[in-house]
Amino acid sequence: MVVCGKICPNCAISQHELFTAIAHCKDELKLPLEFKLESLPFRLITTTLLPQDYAPKVQKAEFFTNTFGADRFAQLEESIAKWAAEKGVQMSFNGVVSQSTRAHRLSRKAFRLGGMKLQLPFLMAVFRAHLQESKDIGDPDVLADLAVEVGIMSSKSEALAFIQSDELEDEVNTMCDEARAKGITGVLLTVIDGKWAVSGGQASDVLVQIVKKLAGVYAPQPLTRLIPPAALVA
């Protein structure tokens, strides 16, 4: 199980590192574990700062400067630019910050319809749209295109109808509230097999070491589940 937000660059980075670690453990180390991922919603940024009515739009640089302060935002930009250059991944602070509830609703819809095989491509598409293409992931048209692209909906009109409804909104709000009630105050948070929690972004080599230890724990049961939490932040 993975708890994360949809507009957070750190969540996108952490997810990339998690996928790298899983691929290494499966393809290179051949560890006897089965990986099943579910991404759970979390709003790190409250609806007071980003209202549910998705207005007004705020430029990313302005939002993060006002939220974290100019110095901390400059450090964030620098660290993310360094990681992106090392990994060959494009990251941008252009565009706007929007409330992420609509994206979380579509993420839950994807998981209901197709589990991680549908949810993970959607999450990757949202991160790409928001952090690489500088698109507004609060915009119904943008989200509808992504929903059709990954196969959550068969047509844009169907996707727009879902987005403009309140389907799964109560579920998303409840899950966000429950996460805070359990003491979760930041993301990314990865919960493994309901027993172990890995807080914050971790490099893939650190995650590989964790999984290797778990493989020893689960050695008598070759295909025991490893369930990390996933998601999109706001």
Image (cartoon, rainbow, N blue to C red):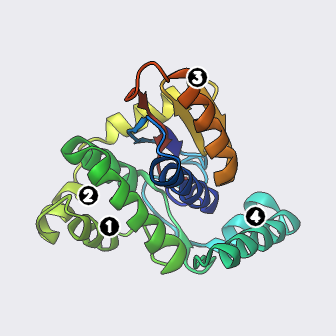
Q: CA distance from mark 4 to mark 2?
A: 29 Å
Instruction: Inspect the image, locate mark 1, and give the three-letter code of the amino acid beneath it.
Output: Leu
- Please give the residue where the numbered disc 1 appears in the rendered image: 143
Q: Along the polypeptide, which appears first: circle 4 or circle 2?
A: 4
Q: CA distance from mark 1 to mark 4?
A: 26 Å
Residue 217, located in which quarter of the rendered image? Answer: top right
| Residue 203 horizontal side relative to residue 40, left or right | right
Q: Which mark is residue 160?
A: none
Looking at the image, do the residues carrying marks 2 and 1 touch, with CB atoms under 8 Å apart? Answer: yes
Is residue 186 at least partly visible in the picture? no
Measured as percent of width and height from the top left, residue 192 is found at: 52, 30
Instruction: Inspect the image, locate mark 2, and give the three-letter code of the amino acid beneath it.
Output: Ile
Asked whether 54 or 104 is in front, the reply is 104
Q: Residue drawn at (49%, 38%), measured in percent from left and top? A: 228
| Residue 105 horizontal side relative to residue 74, left or right | left
Mark 4 secondary-structure assignment: helix
Instruction: Inspect the image, locate mark 4, and give the three-letter code of the amino acid beneath it.
Output: Asn
How dense is the environment of label 2, judged by Cα within 10 Å: few (below 14), some, or many (20 and up)? many
Residue 61 vertical placement versus 7 (above, below): below
How dense is the environment of label 1, judged by Cα within 10 Å: few (below 14), some, or many (20 and up)? many
Q: Which mark is residue 163?
A: 2
Mark 3 secondary-structure assignment: loop
| Labels 2, 1: front one | 1
